[in-house]
Amino acid sequence: MNGTEPVRAFHLRFGSHNLVDPFKEFIEKVLALKGINHLLLECNTSFVFESYPEVTGGTLTKQDAREIAAVCKNNGIRLIPLFQCLGHQGWGGARNSILKAYPEFDETPHVPLDAKWPEIFCRSWCPEHPDVNQLVFELMDELIDAFRADAFHVGMDEVYEMADDNCPRCKGKDRADLFAKAVNDMYRHLVKDRGVEMFIWGDRLNDSEKMGYNQWEGDTFGTHKAIDLIPKDIVIMDWHYEKLDAYPSIGNFIEKGFTVIPTCWFKTDAGLDLLKESKRQAKEHGAEGKLPGMLVTSWNNWDKESIERFINMNSNCFECDEKLNELDELYRTMDVITEQLMERM
């Protein structure tokens, strides 16, 4: 992370050519005016890829990306593309566009396509398949070049399908080693070869039993030991969406030598509590520089109506908590968190 200004980051999923114009207005009239200086843009396969057009799962074009990047740059916002790697290759048993085009990459091809949780949460690609990295790296390169990005987020949250007993390559292998291999492969390409900063979600590196987290915010399957097997200059985004008694992973990442960005969702009280506790732990470790700011995520579907509503919102319009829906809460959370970061970081 560069610079002394606190990181005030906002995340959303976006991959629509038809929404580019209102989205650019959203950047200028909401994000920039609210003091957001980092935009984590999760496009995944919702991009018109030239290298592998068969994996295109959306309509966002290279020209669209260039225009979005230009608006961000003109407004002092660092744009970081996010592309979900390893896990989240579909929902439930359904495959995303990568695994539809290349089913041989599927870690669990035997699982029915209509399977639901708890049989499967979502599919992964096999980190040991000899051909998967070539495809993934070329997709990353297209996104980096299209957005003219100096950083890249590889996702990798909620990865559960690894070392499957039916996988001829991964069966019997240690999940922490497999997870670390995937991270390190991406690190070599992104950081060493492309010279961009690398970001990752933190949940699979958190020991649930030790830290008291559930299976979503922490690991119960054996990947958490990978924390000692990956480079320390990878920036960790550690998400916690509910107010908890403690958030020990923040201090643990700092103690391990990582830069960590605590991450909240739309619950304002939970976000403020996470920020307060994160700052306390950073100060306790004498490493305030390892906590550069905070990220507010959004997981709603961004259509034209929701973008326009956000643009037309005013933080003074909130009458009472009972009347707020998730989009209103998200706006208020971003408003309050960015204000706190501007005043106190």
Image: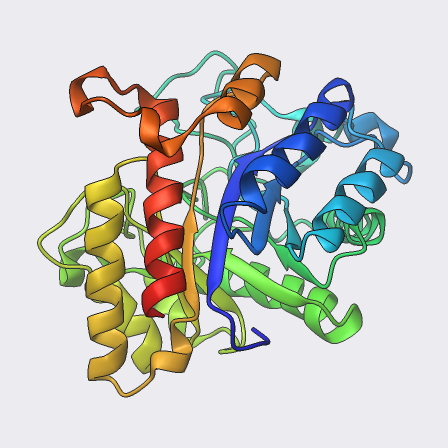
- Image x and y of residue 73, in percent: 74, 54
Q: Quadrant of residue 330?
A: top left
Left or right of 328: which side holds 50? right
Left or right of 130: which side holds 323? left
- Image x and y of residue 342, in percent: 40, 62
Against 295, residue 65 (above or below) is above
Q: Nearer the viewer, residue 302 or 87?
A: 302
Q: Residue at x 32, y 57 (%)?
A: 340
Q: Nearer the viewer, residue 290 or 308?
A: 308
Q: Residue at x 74, y 27 (%)?
A: 20
Against 344, residue 208 (above or below) is above
Left or right of 165: which side holds 64? right
Quadrant where the C terminus lies? bottom left
- Image x and y of residue 4, in percent: 52, 77
Quadrant where the N terminus lies? bottom right
Left or right of 314: which side holds 336? left
Q: Nearer the viewer, residue 313 or 6?
A: 313
Task: Confirm whether residue 9 shows in the render.
Answer: yes
Task: Confirm whether residue 126 shows in the render.
Answer: no
Q: Among all residues in the image, which is located at the extreme front? A: 316
Q: Nearer the viewer, residue 32 or 103?
A: 32
- Image x and y of residue 325, in percent: 30, 19
Report the colour scheme. rainbow
Q: Residue at x 27, y 73 (%)?
A: 252
Number of disc labels: 0
Against 24, residue 271 (above or below) is below
Q: Among all residues in the image, which is located at the extreme left? A: 245
